[in-house]
Image (cartoon, rainbow, N blue to C red):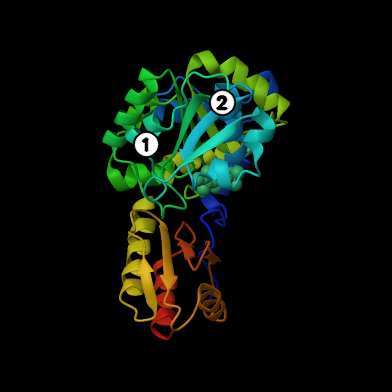
Amino acid sequence: MRVDYRSDTVTKPTPEMLSAMMAAEVGDDIFNEDPTINALQQKAAEMFGMDVGMFCPSGTMANQIAIRLLTRPQDQVICHKYAHIYLYEGGGSATHSGITTRILEGDRGRIRADEVEANINPRDIHQPETRLVSLENTANKGGGSCYPMEWIDEIVEVCQKHSLKLHLDGARLCNALIATHQDPKEYGKKFETISLCLSKGLGAPVGTVLLMKEEYYWQALRIRKMFGGGMRQAGYLAAAGLYALEHHVERLADDHKRAKILGDALAQHPKIASVMPIETNILIFEPDTKYMDNTEFIHQMAQKDIHMFPFGANYVRMVTHLDIDDTMIDYTLEAIKQL
Ligand SMILES: *Cc1c(COP(=O)(O)O)cnc(C)c1O
């Protein structure tokens, strides 16, 4: 049995999702004539209480469009030191937007209002102008941690006080909603832009919707075109996202339950030194180097066809998702026992 915990991006469309894709009505989206893309954008915007959505080929592109949209060259963006926009987008924000990034220490991938405020540059010609704050929810490298709504509200207040824009990298926002029971419509009130990934836990093969206020839409379309992200009959892809939003959100609770079961087993194992608190579908842990390092752990599991990634220092990351079932969990628990 092959069990793949490397990422929640490895899922393949279910037969029902594929049927929805095959049956999609499509048109040329550059002419705004793809009814399925329009339906997806509208559904996502309504769900989060935002004005409009814009379908993008990837989460990286959606984040990069948002940064370009909300900053000017020479500006500075504040984010956590583990942020995807800082670590995993190929330095894109420096290239595409000509900005620098101020990274904060935070707590498991999340930042707090007081640390944001303390890192806003004064008005001084020597210093880059602080323009944008970017949050990530859930925070990937923070072990899938979630923002309490009070933390977000406090950051919104600081942003308003200092005229800063606020972006949310919501690659796993639906995981956060399911784990915290927050109201998605609250999010639309607080952020200028939100990227909502459809190809992570939601199980679509491709796509992210960038949600935004109406006033940004025209300029966002122009930037997407310039970045090469304008697509034509991509309604076939949007249909998968639409299906995912309708059928794959509530079930994220199963992924979270399974991550917790694995995490509990690892926490009790004598050869595991520590496991980060598990809030959603991501597990980050550290083997005890008295027995083995992360490379050795990953190697031993791979011999049983169970796959995961090293995640900096001595850490290992496992992610549960749509294509992980209870049989695979039992098989993994057995393999952990035999370590
Ligand atoms: C995966 C991910 C993205 C976007 O990734 P793409 O592979 O470009 O779709 C953005 N932010 C976070 C936190 C992610 O985990």
Residue 237: quadrant of the picture = top right
Q: Is residue 23 visible?
A: no
Label 1 – label 2 distance at C-alpha: 18 Å
Question: Up-down: is 182 above or below 3?
Answer: above
At x 69%, y 34%, the residue is 95
Disc 2 marks a residue whose amino acid type is Pro
Residue 55 visible in the current orientation: yes
Q: Residue farthest to the top?
A: 215
Residue 136 position (above or below residue 128): below
Q: Earlier in the sequence, mark 1 or mark 2?
A: 1
Q: Which residue is mark 2?
A: 128
Mark 2 secondary-structure assignment: loop
**What is the x, y in percent for residue 298?**
53, 74
Between 161 and 92, the one nearer to me in the picture: 161
Element type at mark 1: helix
Label 2 beta carbon within 8 A of ligand 1: no
The residue depicted at 30 percent of the width and 34 percent of the height is: 183
**Residue, disc 1:** 115
Q: 300 or 330, which is in the foreground?
A: 300
In the rendered image, residue 257, in percent from the top left (x then y), is placed at: 33, 60
